[in-house]
Amino acid sequence: MNGRVARKSSQLGTYTVKSRFSQKMPQYLFIAPAALFVLLFMLYPIAYNIVVSFQDLTLMNLRSGGEFIGLQNYKEMIQTEKFGIALKNTVIYTAACIFFQVIIGYLLAVFLNQDFPFRNFFRSIMLLAWMTPLVITGTLFKWLFDVDHGVINYFLVSLHLIDAPINWLGQQDTALAAVIMTNIWIGIPFNMILILAAMQALPSDVYEAAKVDGASRFQTFWRITLPLLKPALLIILVLGIIYTFKVFDIILIMTGGGPVNATQVLPFYGYELAFVNFDFGASGAVATVILVILICIALIYLYLIKREEAE
Amino acid sequence: MRKYSVKQYALLLTAVIITGIFLFPVYWMVVTSVKPIQDVFATPPMIIPETIQFDAYVKNLIEDRSLLPYIKNSFVTAFGTAFLTLILALPCAYALARFKLRWANILLLILLITQMIPGIMMAMPLYILFSKFELLNSYLALIVGNTTTALPFAIVIMRPFFLSIPKGLEEAAVMDGCNSFTAFTRIILPLTKPIVLTVSTFSFLFAWGDLIFALTLATDEKIRPLTMGLTKFIGQYGTQWDNLMAVSTIAAAPIILAFLFLQKYIVSGITAGAEK
């Protein structure tokens, strides 16, 4: 008796699951094309990078497939001096860019948050710097940083900030700084727009209360604006780090990683290994290191979002 | 018209100066391209050009037409990317917003993470994949490559848009005899114009400015887009900055045009992309 009931209910169970699935089928069809694309052209490549990083795969054995060589690629990667330099430069580049972009972006956002004629025009026109393809920006800044005829040297000399023109991109100790300045220029409007959007979402009554209580401008900034903006700023910061970390185009155009590795960064190094040396295994190892770093940053990002949602 | 105080006009003046300094590089690009070559190399640099001429444009667009195929390739790739992205993203974002599907959250998480992966990491595996299927040097390869950049962004910013459309609309449609597919195409799609414009502008611009996939997936000059054309010109022209800046200005023109006409959609796209 009991057994029959149990069997019947379990039958009922499979029945409802089945009908649920056939009912949900058309709904899954909406997602299927995009999911298939993501699986085939995005998740598969990521997995492929990891698999290849344990193989000896070059242009020679591309068709037959590489041989499994364990951690050999990683050992060689750590031993090459270039990897250390690239990692160091990527960290310096990302940190310097984000630091200046966020500060200048913040100041501009404060300025453009005031009420004056055509302010919306000024807010968006600056985005041109961010929207322009990086190849163009890179070429343009190469011209601006030119030793003999570059306008940056001209301005710096006329303002007596430097005595003689600097060969910005041609010498080891200034090349990275020049590339960083270029990318700061690109990223400022992006940060400005996002910080501005966050500022406009702040409640105005708190500021009125602060005014009534006689708080100074500095106090208002330190005690009210900054704490209120903190969640949004953290997300902007993490997004900025992720986007800056990707640096590739402007390095290729402006310096090609040189002079003597002065501007070598991880994504560019990975590119060189794959498409100049055709050492796909070694490139996969660099790609996997980038992936691990990005996943760590992404986890921080997701944690921050979760925490913000909980509040 | 609104009345503004003197202080507000002072702020306007400050804004003009700040924007002027900030966008000086863009000005310099255009100005260099319309100067005679001896003025380009004048010391001190001529901030305001004395003579304006369009020789560099005539030379690169009319006399020497080698630039035109690159422009065509860029348009094909960019329109193709925008089209593929929309076809894939619209139904997916809609379903993620509307239906309670078991895998929906996982897909959303995957999209958020893949959005952060550098394009160069996709390039090597896609190069190997496409070379196995003999698809290198095809528009399809470039379009697929660029869609890997555009798709996560598209879905992430479209989903909140669909969430904001009242659910009653489709319920009414279903009462009138629509199924979930026709409810989507007849009732919801016509409402999506603003978000479709934002997403297609962004995917177009992503693909237009792409260098990574152009560099790695297209080794044949016949298929390469304008960004690669520009790098070829850098090698060819060396320091002929007037020609280089003219080609750069031509390559930047669609961005500037998109900007003038679709500004609203661009700004909303950027701010929406930064929300979860």
Image: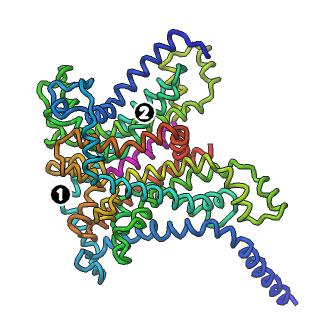
Residue A188: name its quadrant.
Answer: top left
What span is in magenta?
A230-248
**Vertical relation: A153 (above or below) B166:** above
- Residue B225 vs residue A195: left or right? left
Q: Is residue A88 visible?
A: no
Q: State left or right for residue B240 relative to residue B271.
A: left
Judge the density around disc 1: few (<14), some (14-19), many (≥20) Cα neighbours within 10 Å.
Answer: few
Say what amino acid the circle numbered 1 marks: Glu
**Residue that appears at 15% across and 28% down:** B42
Q: Residue at x 26, y 32 (%)?
A: B53
Residue under numbered circle 1? A81
Which residue is depicted at the point 62% across and 48% down? Answer: B193
Q: Is residue B164 above or below residue A186?
A: below
Look at the image and tell me in which quarter the N terminus of chain B lies: top right
User: How many residues crowd mark 2 within 10 Å: few (<14), some (14–19), many (20+)?
Assistant: many
Q: Secondary structure at mark 2?
A: loop
Specify whether residue B138 is in view: yes
Image quadrant where residue B88 sits: bottom right
A142 and B95: which is toward the camera = A142
Amino acid type at circle 2 is: Met
Query: Badge 2 is on which residue?
Result: A126
